Image: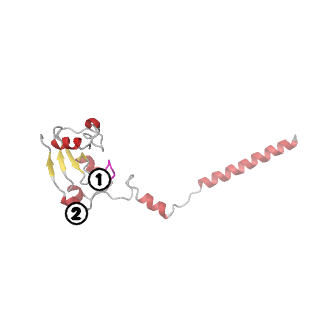
Amino acid sequence: MAKDYVLILASVAALAVISAATFLCSRRRRAPSPSQRRAAAGDVELGQGVVGVDAAVLAGYPTLVYSSTSPEKDEEEAAGAGAPGGSDAARCAVCLADYADGDELRRMPDCRHAFHRGCIDQWLRRRPTCPVCRASPPPAGKAAGSTAAVVAAGS
Protein backbone atom coordinates (compact mmCIF):
# COMPACT_ATOMS: atom_id res chain seq x y z
CA MET A 1 0.00 0.00 0.00
CA ALA A 2 2.82 2.38 0.81
CA LYS A 3 4.31 1.63 -2.59
CA ASP A 4 1.07 2.82 -4.22
CA TYR A 5 1.28 6.19 -2.44
CA VAL A 6 4.88 6.65 -3.50
CA LEU A 7 3.99 5.81 -7.13
CA ILE A 8 1.04 8.24 -7.12
CA LEU A 9 3.14 10.98 -5.50
CA ALA A 10 5.95 10.48 -8.06
CA SER A 11 3.45 10.62 -10.94
CA VAL A 12 1.85 13.83 -9.64
CA ALA A 13 5.30 15.41 -9.16
CA ALA A 14 6.36 14.44 -12.69
CA LEU A 15 3.12 15.84 -14.11
CA ALA A 16 3.65 19.10 -12.19
CA VAL A 17 7.21 19.45 -13.51
CA ILE A 18 6.10 18.78 -17.11
CA SER A 19 3.22 21.27 -16.78
CA ALA A 20 5.50 23.96 -15.36
CA ALA A 21 8.08 23.44 -18.13
CA THR A 22 5.38 23.64 -20.80
CA PHE A 23 3.94 26.81 -19.27
CA LEU A 24 7.32 28.51 -19.09
CA CYS A 25 8.22 27.57 -22.68
CA SER A 26 4.90 28.80 -24.05
CA ARG A 27 5.25 32.18 -22.31
CA ARG A 28 8.74 32.80 -23.56
CA ARG A 29 8.64 35.43 -26.28
CA ARG A 30 10.85 35.09 -29.26
CA ALA A 31 11.87 38.01 -31.43
CA PRO A 32 10.24 37.75 -34.87
CA SER A 33 12.49 36.67 -37.69
CA PRO A 34 13.33 39.18 -40.47
CA SER A 35 10.89 37.48 -42.85
CA GLN A 36 8.11 37.71 -40.25
CA ARG A 37 8.85 41.42 -39.74
CA ARG A 38 8.68 42.05 -43.50
CA ALA A 39 5.38 40.16 -43.77
CA ALA A 40 3.84 42.14 -40.90
CA ALA A 41 5.14 45.44 -42.28
CA GLY A 42 3.55 44.87 -45.68
CA ASP A 43 0.13 43.52 -44.79
CA VAL A 44 -2.13 45.14 -47.39
CA GLU A 45 -5.37 43.86 -45.90
CA LEU A 46 -4.62 45.45 -42.53
CA GLY A 47 -3.26 48.60 -44.12
CA GLN A 48 0.05 48.23 -42.30
CA GLY A 49 3.20 49.53 -43.92
CA VAL A 50 1.47 50.04 -47.25
CA VAL A 51 0.77 53.46 -48.65
CA GLY A 52 -2.46 53.95 -50.57
CA VAL A 53 -2.95 55.66 -53.90
CA ASP A 54 -1.56 59.18 -54.26
CA ALA A 55 -4.22 61.93 -54.35
CA ALA A 56 -3.05 63.17 -57.76
CA VAL A 57 -3.37 59.67 -59.26
CA LEU A 58 -6.73 59.17 -57.57
CA ALA A 59 -8.05 62.40 -59.10
CA GLY A 60 -7.25 60.93 -62.52
CA TYR A 61 -9.62 57.98 -62.08
CA PRO A 62 -12.81 58.39 -64.14
CA THR A 63 -16.05 59.43 -62.45
CA LEU A 64 -19.66 59.16 -63.53
CA VAL A 65 -23.11 59.96 -62.24
CA TYR A 66 -25.31 56.94 -61.57
CA SER A 67 -28.64 56.62 -63.29
CA SER A 68 -30.91 53.59 -63.09
CA THR A 69 -31.74 54.05 -66.79
CA SER A 70 -28.12 54.38 -67.92
CA PRO A 71 -27.19 52.73 -71.25
CA GLU A 72 -23.81 51.91 -69.66
CA LYS A 73 -25.59 49.82 -66.99
CA ASP A 74 -27.46 47.87 -69.68
CA GLU A 75 -24.16 47.11 -71.46
CA GLU A 76 -22.57 45.84 -68.21
CA GLU A 77 -25.53 43.56 -67.43
CA ALA A 78 -25.50 42.21 -71.00
CA ALA A 79 -21.80 41.45 -70.67
CA GLY A 80 -22.44 39.56 -67.42
CA ALA A 81 -20.76 42.10 -65.12
CA GLY A 82 -23.59 42.08 -62.61
CA ALA A 83 -25.07 39.32 -60.53
CA PRO A 84 -28.39 37.75 -61.54
CA GLY A 85 -31.05 40.38 -61.20
CA GLY A 86 -28.41 43.12 -61.14
CA SER A 87 -28.44 43.38 -57.32
CA ASP A 88 -24.65 43.61 -56.89
CA ALA A 89 -24.21 45.75 -59.98
CA ALA A 90 -26.15 48.57 -58.28
CA ARG A 91 -24.46 48.37 -54.87
CA CYS A 92 -21.26 49.92 -53.53
CA ALA A 93 -18.97 47.13 -52.29
CA VAL A 94 -17.37 49.45 -49.74
CA CYS A 95 -20.39 50.80 -47.83
CA LEU A 96 -22.86 48.13 -49.09
CA ALA A 97 -25.49 50.77 -49.89
CA ASP A 98 -27.48 50.70 -53.14
CA TYR A 99 -26.76 53.41 -55.67
CA ALA A 100 -29.39 56.11 -56.04
CA ASP A 101 -29.97 58.24 -59.12
CA GLY A 102 -27.53 61.14 -59.07
CA ASP A 103 -24.85 59.44 -56.92
CA GLU A 104 -21.32 60.26 -58.05
CA LEU A 105 -19.34 57.09 -58.71
CA ARG A 106 -15.66 56.51 -59.36
CA ARG A 107 -14.61 53.70 -61.70
CA MET A 108 -11.36 51.78 -61.28
CA PRO A 109 -9.38 52.18 -64.52
CA ASP A 110 -8.29 48.58 -65.11
CA CYS A 111 -10.97 46.33 -63.62
CA ARG A 112 -13.78 48.87 -64.26
CA HIS A 113 -15.50 48.25 -60.90
CA ALA A 114 -17.46 51.31 -59.74
CA PHE A 115 -18.06 52.58 -56.20
CA HIS A 116 -19.39 55.70 -54.48
CA ARG A 117 -16.72 58.34 -55.02
CA GLY A 118 -16.32 59.15 -51.32
CA CYS A 119 -16.18 55.47 -50.32
CA ILE A 120 -13.55 54.41 -52.85
CA ASP A 121 -11.44 57.53 -52.35
CA GLN A 122 -11.24 56.81 -48.63
CA TRP A 123 -10.51 53.11 -49.32
CA LEU A 124 -7.74 53.84 -51.83
CA ARG A 125 -6.03 56.33 -49.52
CA ARG A 126 -5.45 53.42 -47.11
CA ARG A 127 -5.11 50.41 -49.44
CA PRO A 128 -3.86 50.36 -53.01
CA THR A 129 -6.23 47.63 -54.27
CA CYS A 130 -9.74 47.28 -55.65
CA PRO A 131 -12.16 46.20 -52.87
CA VAL A 132 -13.81 43.62 -55.14
CA CYS A 133 -11.04 41.92 -57.12
CA ARG A 134 -7.94 43.15 -55.23
CA ALA A 135 -6.37 44.35 -58.49
CA SER A 136 -3.60 46.87 -57.98
CA PRO A 137 -4.04 50.31 -59.51
CA PRO A 138 -2.22 51.09 -62.76
CA PRO A 139 1.03 53.09 -62.74
CA ALA A 140 0.66 56.85 -62.25
CA GLY A 141 1.19 57.67 -65.95
CA LYS A 142 -1.47 55.23 -67.16
CA ALA A 143 -4.12 56.42 -64.68
CA ALA A 144 -3.50 60.08 -65.46
CA GLY A 145 -3.96 59.39 -69.17
CA SER A 146 -7.36 57.77 -68.63
CA THR A 147 -9.06 60.77 -67.03
CA ALA A 148 -12.58 61.10 -68.33
CA ALA A 149 -15.74 62.52 -66.84
CA VAL A 150 -18.66 60.39 -67.96
CA VAL A 151 -22.21 61.45 -67.24
CA ALA A 152 -24.78 58.69 -67.47
CA ALA A 153 -27.82 59.32 -69.63
CA GLY A 154 -30.96 60.37 -67.86
CA SER A 155 -29.20 62.32 -65.08
- The dominant secondary structure in magenta is loop
Give coordinates of residue 119: x percent, y percent: 27, 46
Occupied quadrant, residue 74: top left
For the point 24% across and 62% down, the residue is 140
Give coordinates of residue 39: x percent, y percent: 44, 59
Residue 103 at least partly seen: no
Q: Which residue is mark 1?
A: 124
The three-letter code of the residue at mark 2 reads: Gly
For the point 82% across and 45% down, the residue is 7
Say above or below: 103 vs 49.
above
Please tell me whether residue 63 belongs to the stretch shown in magenta: no
Q: Secondary structure at mark 2?
A: helix
Please tell me whether residue 132 belongs to the stretch shown in magenta: yes
Give coordinates of residue 98: x percent, y percent: 25, 38
**Residue reaching furthest top?**
85
The three-letter code of the residue at mark 1 reads: Leu
Give coordinates of residue 94: x percent, y percent: 30, 44
